[in-house]
Amino acid sequence: MAPAQQLDRPGNGELSGYSYRLLDGWVMPPDITDESFAFSRNLPTRPTDICFVSYPKSGTTWLAYILVLLTGKKKDSLETSYFWPESDRTFQGTAEDLAQLDDPRMFKSHMPYDMTLGNPARSPCRYIYIARNPKDVCTSYYHFERNQPWSGFFDGGWDRWFEMFLNGKVQRGDWFDHVLSWWEKRHQENVMFVKYEDLQKNFDSELRRIADFLLIEVDDAMINEIRDTVSFSNMKTNKFSSLVNRDCHSCFFRKGKVGTWREQFTAKQTELFDSMYRDRMADTGLSFDFD
């Protein structure tokens, strides 16, 4: 693997003013260092480990809270209930620290399949990937990244962001490549693929499906309690899940609805996006609800 290339706020080029680095050809946040990436990839995993994965702004925090409640691993805050070793900003511990944790250990990743913690092709860990329709992801990600320290305080405007997203030139890279890398592995025994929109529309049945994958027994009372606890309104105001320790916790939760892209996309942008979506998703068997 070639060393990551630091390209923090370059003066020229298509990503000028946006903080990122290149890692194995993928646009990544600057805090994904060679060392943290190698640590994450080579981390010894267990059959009881759970790693939830997504492209950013796809329902990651929602899924994390669900998993914490399902496993009973709730700690002082949602952030301290799991570990995110791929970034030297989010994890400063050692492999020995992680080895001493009780089962099940919970991990987070925003990596494509071939770059995820523990190497899912040979890891006994169970991976749950959540994906969301790309128009809502693009919109939510724009509001998440603009004027924030992790993006180099980028604010090139929506039109510029839209172009960057379509070209895969935002942190975590090309949405299509990222999502399809996991979709293609959905039949792997230790991989589960979940869609954000399905969880919105059919929460109870999707929760049961997740529980079955994790070999956790749930009853109606537990499902009702989890559904109420992880409602969007509760998560946005609940001190446990509101990510108050982050630099800008309020931008983690915007609207939590399907179809908010309509408030952002122009007619021309919708046409361009739809054309690319048809081309890139053709013959994949994967589709999303956009409303």
Image: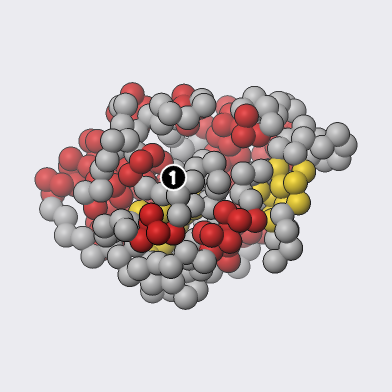
In the image, residue 177 lies at what x, y percent? 63, 59
Q: Residue at x 47, y 64 (%)?
A: 43
**42 vs 36: above or below:** below
| Quadrant position of residue 141 | top right
**Residue 179 makes an appearance in the image:** no
**33 vs 229: above or below:** below
**233 vs 113: above or below:** above
Q: Which residue is labeled 1 in the image? A: 60
Residue at the right extreme of this rendering: 12
In the image, residue 127 lies at what x, y percent? 41, 62
Determine whether, in the image, residue 96 is placed left or right of residue 290: left
Q: Nearer the viewer, residue 77 or 255?
A: 77
In the image, residue 201 lies at what x, y percent? 34, 45
Q: Residue at x 38, y 56 (%)?
A: 98
Q: Nearer the viewer, residue 238 or 11?
A: 11
Give the residue type that dot 1 points to: Thr
